[in-house]
Amino acid sequence: MNSQTIKTEKPPLTEILKALETRFDIRFTYADKTIEGVKIDEPSTLLSYNNAITYLRTNTNLNFKIINSRFVAIAPSREVMRPIEALQEVQLSTYLTTGITKTKTGEVVLNPEEFGILPGLIEPDVLQTVQALPGVLSVDESVSNLNVRGGTHDQNLILWDGIKMYQSGHFFGLISAFDPSLVSNVVISKNGTSALYGDGVSSTIDMRLDTDLNEENSAGLGLNLIQADGFAKVKLQGNMELQLSARRSITDVVNTPTYKQYFDRIFQESDIYSPTENSQNSTSNEKFYFYDISTKLLHDLSTKDKLRFSFTTIFNALDYLESSTDNNVTTVLNSNIIQRNLAAGLNYNRQWSTFLSTEVQLNISDYKLNATNFNAENDQRLQQNNQVLDHGITFQIKLDFNDRLRWTNGYQYSQVGITNLEAINNPEFRSENKSEVNTHSTFSEFTFSSYNNRTHLKIGTRSNYYKPFNMLLLEPRLSLNHKVLKYFKVEFLGEFKSQVTSQIIDRQNDFLGIEKRRWILANNTTLPIIESKQASIGLHYNKNKLLISIEAFIKHVDGITTRSQGFQNQYQNINAIGSYETKGVDFLINKQFNAFSTWLSYSFSNNDYSFLTLNNAEDFANNTDVSHVLSFAGTYTHNNLKLALGFNWNSGRPTTTPNAEQPIFDNNINYNTANNTNLNDYFRTDISGTYNFNVAKNTKAEIGFSIWNLLNRKNTLNSYYILNEDDSISRINNKSLGFTPNLSFRVVF
């Protein structure tokens, strides 16, 4: 019997593209003529998204360009498409440095894996990187106090893989609490937010982990003068992958120069800071450490069904001994503070067809802040607890009519419960407050790109029904980007938003004077629901790697309270309800050369409070009103070497001074009008550099250095006054980080 080989004909590329569109929920955009007659072998079904695109590039004579998480453009294999070419208009543009891009609908996207370098940073710290964007500032150099267009930190919605996080910093705000090792991309919205998102009247920072399986295993280890970390992405089987990352501080083992600067910066205002000479109290044996652990399990149940489970824990702990000597008898007691956030999420995605997909996510976030403070001299113990338990479900359905039009609808339910406890043993006192808010939300949104890709539109609305208050709020959202001339684009963004969670400061010495803010819930009377309205219009010019952008905005926020604003003047103990309004302009010019990228950003804003019961009902400057913010930076990349240098200047935040003629009245400090003056200008110079090299086959290493505040300038971040026992007044100045060096070593294999 003769045998013969049966040759199977290769399928046309169109069939393969359709299969990949269904499998990865993406869309290929191309001209029919581009792929006409192209046939290749079918790729393995085990290939990840990125590896599937690589397979197509390798096996066709075509250029596959990943536009974003949803679109891939196919063009003939030439370096550059014709200027005004439709596909080119969909592309993201590089923003400041590699790994930071801006989309056509107004968001800024950070990709940690492709991150270049920024001054003062040797790693893609998410919340530090955000501060490089115009309109984003931290008035106290803290990632736990991000002020986006004049808002407070609690007005930012921070999501980790779709889960709301209530703790954002390690070392009480100097380091981001989120390890970038597993983060795939971060989507940042200052305005024109998607209707999917609730909360966060100032901004949304959405950290997204991998959604697709990787083809190969990978791992890495890192060490710097503050922490050690590691990550691994391991294939358990063809359709399952486990990702894991962990970080831990080395501060309780090694006393590095970086740790000393961080310690002095954070604890300068707390009970731990050096006591006066005549004091009978002292502190010793300070031990501080932090860690975070994150994991994600990815399981492809089929080519159409994806199951994902995410978990993270963030932890900070500080304890120290407080001693008191009386009649040669020394009493030693242990004070401590613990802060942590546990979060978990379960996500199931089903791609029913190229037209229909659905997604369900269950999530829970559990935040706790506990402190015990002993006063040995008075034999007194103060216990303070703040706990948030947030859980909910989100369901959404996506309808893709074609590669230019998507309609998303969904429902979201959340239940948030918050407990605040304060207890004193001498005299005996106990106060515990519990509250809970249930919210039912629906959202609907269209995203549209015109046939010639000159117009990009995202329009939607969100409804929030707050059950305890029987209140329904409608929140329209809009993002419109239109190309008006060859290299110019006009952008209009607008949104209504609301939130029921906020942070307050009852006393400046809450939680040992280190972590002063505690989470609370709105009650719709003394604590209203916070509501915001924002609109902005921008003009962007982009040609030959030159980006010039100017954006004017106005934001109005109602329902804030004095307790949430951190007053340290005559309004410190007043409970009043009011609003603030910010008007301003953000400007950016960014020029990229072959090896250089340089940019200048400037923000001007006017941010005023309005409290009917304060300041004779006249508006006055917001505590975060920094009118002028300027930064200039440049990066240089040559082969494996990256260098960055930058300068940051601002006009100083508002402060309130005592009346010069009559500083004390009725045994209290007699202040001038609230926020009557400003602190001195702030100026900081940062530098950083990294070098990559191969140490073995498939093993790469990176060494890095950074210096924060290179010139060691003594910037004043905050200033307030206290009344002494002898009726004299003392001014307390909180200083910024001084000259802070850091070194790092990282290996990836």
Image (tube, rainbow, N blue to C red):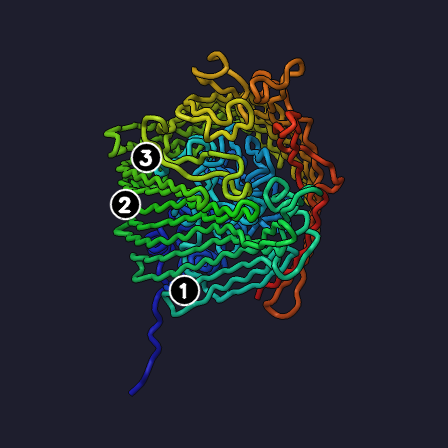
Give the mark, 3 or 1, whose residue is nearer the N terminus. Answer: 1
Q: Residue furthest right?
A: 711
Residue 408 drawn at (x, y percent): 30, 39
Could you tell whether 58 is left or right of 730 in the image? left
The answer, for residue 701, to whether it is visible in the render is yes
Front position among marks 3 and 1: 1
Residue at (57% x, 66% y) in the render: 749
Q: Residue furthest bottom?
A: 1
Mark 2 and 3 residues: CB-CB less than 8 Å, in contact?
no
Classify 634 as above or below 553.
below
**Residue carrying label 2:** 395
Residue 405 drawn at (x, y percent): 33, 37
Classify 661 as above or below 623.
above
Q: CA distance from mark 2 to mark 3?
A: 14 Å
Q: What's the amino acid at mark 3?
A: Glu
**Residue carrying label 3:** 445
Mark 2 and 1 residues: CB-CB less than 8 Å, in contact?
no
**Residue carrying label 1:** 241
Classify 680 as above or below 368.
above
Q: What's the amino acid at mark 1?
A: Glu
Q: Secondary structure at mark 3?
A: strand
Give the mark, 2 or 3, whose residue is nearer the N terminus. Answer: 2
Camera-nearest residue between 54 and 269: 269
Q: Dot 1 surroundings within 10 Å: few (below 14), some, or many (20 or more)?
A: many
Residue at (26% x, 28% y) in the render: 471
Q: Secondary structure at mark 1?
A: strand
